[in-house]
Amino acid sequence: MKNPTIAFAAPTIKKVIRDAYETKRRAIDSLEQLRIGGDELTATRVDAWTADVAARGVDFTSVAATHDTVKRELETHQKKVEAVESLLGLVELRIKQLKTQHGGEVIEVLKERIATLQKEKSNDERDVEAANETIANLWKEVRELDPDAPSTGSRKK
């Protein structure tokens, strides 16, 4: 007896483009969080060790154990950073391919994202600055693909 074939719908090219840009944004945010986390991890471990040494003096067994723990945690952390950076590089290559093969659709998706960001700006000045920066970067990408695209609206508040 034959198993029925299940047809899977391929995502539309616009969805692929949206997903690529969303993944890029999230990967960049994750890298920032990982870098902050690495700094906090180091600071926390150093603070704990210095407190221990200040209270009890240098215990060489404790020094070796602390060193091994910190080294292992930082290596694990660095592997996460490298993995995200590597995958981000692949996403950026895919976006470059999409721009080459589907420039018109990329422009449409970027303009949709710009419109959404302009509507969603909050009253928080930091959020507005971040949104304006993102909008400016998106307009820059649009103009790379379409030099005739209007540059107005790229700095609206």
Image (cartoon, rainbow, N blue to C red):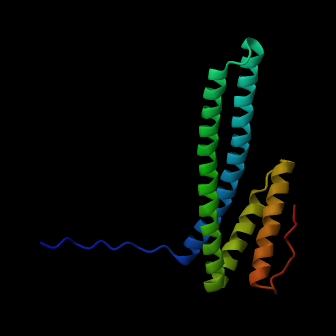
Viewer-nearest residue: 89 or 108: 89
Q: How many numbered badges does the structure rendering display? A: 0
| Residue in view at x 74 percent, y 40 percent | 39
Picture quarter containing residue 134?
bottom right
Quarter of the rendering occupied by the N terminus: bottom left
| Residue in view at x 79 percent, y 80 percent | 143
Q: What residue occupies the far top of the structure in this picture?
A: 56
Picture quarter containing residue 23?
bottom right
The spot of residue 115 in percent (x, y) is 74, 68
Q: Is residue 107 visible?
A: yes
Picture quarter containing residue 47?
top right
| Residue in view at x 83 percent, y 61 percent | 132
Q: What residue occupies the far front of the structure in this picture?
A: 60
The spot of residue 22 in percent (x, y) is 63, 62
Side of 23 where 119 appears, left or right: right
Viewer-nearest residue: 84 or 14: 84
- Where 82 sits versus 69, above or below? below
- Where 131 sits versus 6, above or below? above
The spot of residue 4 in percent (x, y) is 22, 72
| Residue in view at x 64 percent, y 22 percent | 62
Side of 148 where 58 appears, left or right: left
Q: Is residue 123 visible?
A: no
Quarter of the rendering occupied by the C terminus: bottom right
The spot of residue 2 in percent (x, y) is 16, 73
- Where 111 sits versus 67, above or below? below
